[in-house]
Structures are given as C-alpha cells and as structure tokens.
Image (cartoon, rainbow, N blue to C red):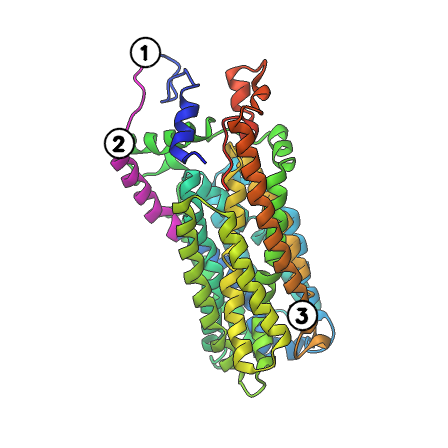
Amino acid sequence: MSSEKEIAQALEHEQTSPKDGSTDGSQPELEWTEEEETTIRRKIDWHTVPLVTLLYMLTFLDRINIGNARVQGLGDEMGFNEGYGFNWALSIFYIIYLLVEVPSNILLKRIGARFYLPLLVVGFGFVSICTAFVRDFGGLMTARAFLGIFEGGAMPGMAFYLSCFYKRNELLFRIGIYVSAASIAGAFGGLLAAGLSQIPEWGIASMRLYAWRNIFFFEGIITCLCGLAAPIWMPNGPSDCKFLTERQRKIAAERLVREHKVDEAEQVTWADVKKAMLCLHNYTCALAFFAINITVQGLSVFMPTILRELNRSWTPTQVQLYSVPPYVAACAVAVGIAYISDKTQRRGIYLAGFSLIALTGFLIMRFVTDTNARYGGIFLITVGAFPGGPGFLSWGINNSAGPAVRAVSTAYIVSLGTIGGIVATWTYIPKDGPKYHTGHTINIVGQSVTFCLAMFGIFYCMRENRLRAQGKRDHRLEGLTEREAQKLGYKHPRFKYWV
C-alpha cells in the first residue's frame, strides 16, 4: 500500500488552487521542511495529549468507581448483593450514554472543544459528588442517568478532537495514549478506593460521609477542579494554538487540509451524516468495538467483584490492590502497540492478534480452577482487550475522509460500541457467582467475533485498495467538478484505506 506521504502527494497534484488557502493565485504556496513539521507535532503532543489523557482518565474513573464502591459497602447498603439492582444501575448509564454520543459530537463541531469538553468534565464530576449523598436505589439510578448525559460525549469528543490535530499515520499512537487512561483509571481507581475508604466518617448529622461515599465525593471534587482549569491549556484547533508561532499555526492547519483535501472548519451536513452511516468499514469497526466493549466495560466495573469471588479470604482493601497490576500491564501494552501500529501503518493484524490473547484469558477463567492461574488469566484479558478500543476507533477514523465525516463516524462507532457496554452490565450477575461461567462464556464469544471482524476488515480494505489501484473505482469521478470530487471522501478513487 502507498505510504501516507505518497497518497497526499498524489492528491496534491490534482489541486490547482493555492495551498495556503488564498484565492489569489499570485500568492506563493506555503512550504515547510520535515524538521519544522516534527517540531510543530511535538509541541502539539505536549500541549494536547497529556491534557486529553487526564480528562479521559477522570471520565473513566467516575464511570467505574461504582464497582470499587460496591465492595466497600455500597452493595450491602443498597441491597446489590442479591437481585439485579447493581446491573440496572450500570445499564441506565450506558443507555443514556448511547443516546447522546452523536448529537454531542455535532454540538462539539459547532461550539468548539475548548469550553465544550471541559463543561462535560465538570458536569460528570458534579454528578459524582452528588452520588456520595444518595440514600436509596432511585437516587442512585437518577445519578447514573445524569452521569451518562455528561459522559456520553466525552470519549467520541476527545477522539475527534485529537483527529483535528494529527494525520492518519500519527493518530493511533495519540488515541492509544489517551484511551490507555481507561486502564490507568482502573489501576488508580483501585488505589484511590483503598485509600479514600479508610478516611474516618465525617460530615454533618444529616449528611455523613464514609467508606464508599468518600470515593464518590473526593473523586468528583478532583474531576471538577481539573475540568474548570482545562480551558486555560486547551486550544480549539491547530489554527488556535497560542503555543505556536503564526507560521507554525498555518503549517499545522495546512498539513491537514492537504491530506484530507477539505477545510478542517467545515460544518457537519446531512450528507456527511449519511456518508458516515453508509460506510461498510465503519460498521466493521463499530461491531468490533461493540464486542470489545463487552469485555472492557464489563471488566472495569466487575473486576473487584470477580477478584472478591476469586479468593474469599481477601479483604476489600486487598481486592482493590489486586486490581491494580492487570491495569498497569494493560496500559503499557496498549500504548506500545499503538506506537508500533502507527509506525508500521497497520491496524487489523494487531487487533486480530490481541483478541486471541484476550480469548485465551477467558478460556482460563472459564475452565481452570486454580486461583493463581485464574488471576494470570485476568492479566491476559486486560492486555489483550484494552488495545482493541483505541485500535478499532482509530481504524475507523483513519478511513473516514473529511473532518465533518470523521466527527460523525467517531461518535457513530462509539455509539454502536456502547451497546456492548449495556450487554456488559448483564454478563456477571449474582446468581452466576462465584465462577461466573455465563459471563466468561459471553466474553469468549465476544473475543471470537472481534477476531473475525478484524480479519474481515483486513481483507475488505486490501480488496478496495487493489480495485482502486487497478482503476476500477475511477468511474466515480465522471462528470464531477474538482470540489465535488473532493467531497467523495473515502469513496474517492485515490483514497487508500489503512489495512
């Protein structure tokens, strides 16, 4: 397959208008060296990726802390250790989350990221604080529903935000870093829960905070403070980066325009929505993201429960601490694979391979009885499954041309994937404990489906690239103006899919 630079150069030869965005052909074309572009990219890296990673870590932390709270007394107080109350509290979050993802990304495109994304962060941080004061099941359900409203736009919004700064061959490593915050949150969440739950009971007579309530309260405070400070460092896009010089801002924006052949400031239209919805590769990535989410979201909230049943002699604090190492391993592997995938410009082969690792882990959990072996299986599951989320998401973004289509595709893939989160909330139910054979079997099927979809994506993209190289998609350009040809996006005969 042609390299990203070769693809961009081939497309550039077709465009006759000046590449600095001017309408006067007398103005010189904007040119720059590879060293300049590297310097700009590194500056953007240091100013955007750490911030987005922090915000997403807080997003995931406030989402999964209910699992930590359960073993610290929430389950006993709310009666979750019998019946399906805990599963319903998880489900309502994902149902609301699913409904707001696409509308939220459209709003993000119109409003701008600098204030919209931090607003979401402050919102779910405030909801976490409120959760510390719930007194019954109805109050908890209400809090989880509001949490879904604010968190629903966070992941697709942050993924789209990063795609506005980077080329296709630069994207997965950055998305891999920020989505690895999910595993960081899992590890950090266990440590925080172990510490915060030890704070002595405090508060006024009618609002006493203790154990699990401290987890929600203090984690919510941290989230709100970070969200309020975020706009200070967060630019809306490449042309709005105050840490770059005027020339660097022009280069940062122009390099993306030349690759995608469209204006990064274009607004979302119904045609863009239709184009994203009808892309077969988006369905492949979305269905795989669905299967991956059954594992990632399920493991994130049920990990403390699974570990507690793994060894009943462990105290709640020990359970929280034993949850840390698998997440640390998952974080390191996810970032490493994202880096290698970007360097080799391959997606599918890594996604297929790591789904087999996760599958092996679930087979161990399902059929092996030794406690140490089963704990090792959890490592295989986290290491194999956590790279899948950013991998399939970035694969879909890579193969969506144009910022408007990318905005819809990102939210669309995550929206369908979120249904996997709803399924995940019912994979581990009380009557299936302590071995949870049904839950592990569901995940075995999920990882098998993930492998098949990754392989299908590889062969589909290879076939499309071959047909385009043979000129069998050139008929799509017949009778079109240059502008209409540019709007073809991923259907353009010169657009090459990432494999």
Bounds of the magenta segment: 26-50
**Which residue is at the front of the view, 461 or 297?**
461
Q: Is residue 321 above or below residue 111?
A: below
Per the image, label 2 sits on a secondary structure element best described as loop
Q: Give me the residue at 56% from left, 30% from top.
A: 467
Relative placement, left or right, of 44 versus 495 is left
In which quarter of the view is residue 19 placed?
top left
Q: CA distance from mark 1 to mark 3?
A: 67 Å
**Which residue is at the front of the view, 324 or 460?**
460
Q: Who comes first in sequence, dot 1 or dot 3?
A: 1
Q: Which numbered circle lies on residue 26? A: 1
**Which residue is at the front of the view, 491 or 66?**
491
Task: Using a 10 Å C-alpha cutoff, classify the residue at mark 2 as few (fewer than 14 neighbours), some (14 to 19) or many (20 or more).
Answer: few
User: Mark 2 highlights which residue?
Assistant: 33
Q: CA distance from mark 2 to mark 3?
A: 55 Å
Question: Where, quadrant-wise, is the N terminus in this rendering?
Answer: top left
User: Mark 3 highlights which residue?
Assistant: 428
What amino acid is at disc 2? Answer: Thr
Q: Is residue 36 visible?
A: yes
Q: Who comes first in sequence, dot 2 or dot 1?
A: 1
What amino acid is at disc 1? Answer: Ser
Percent across and percent down for residue 8 are 41, 29
Per the image, label 1 sits on a secondary structure element best described as loop
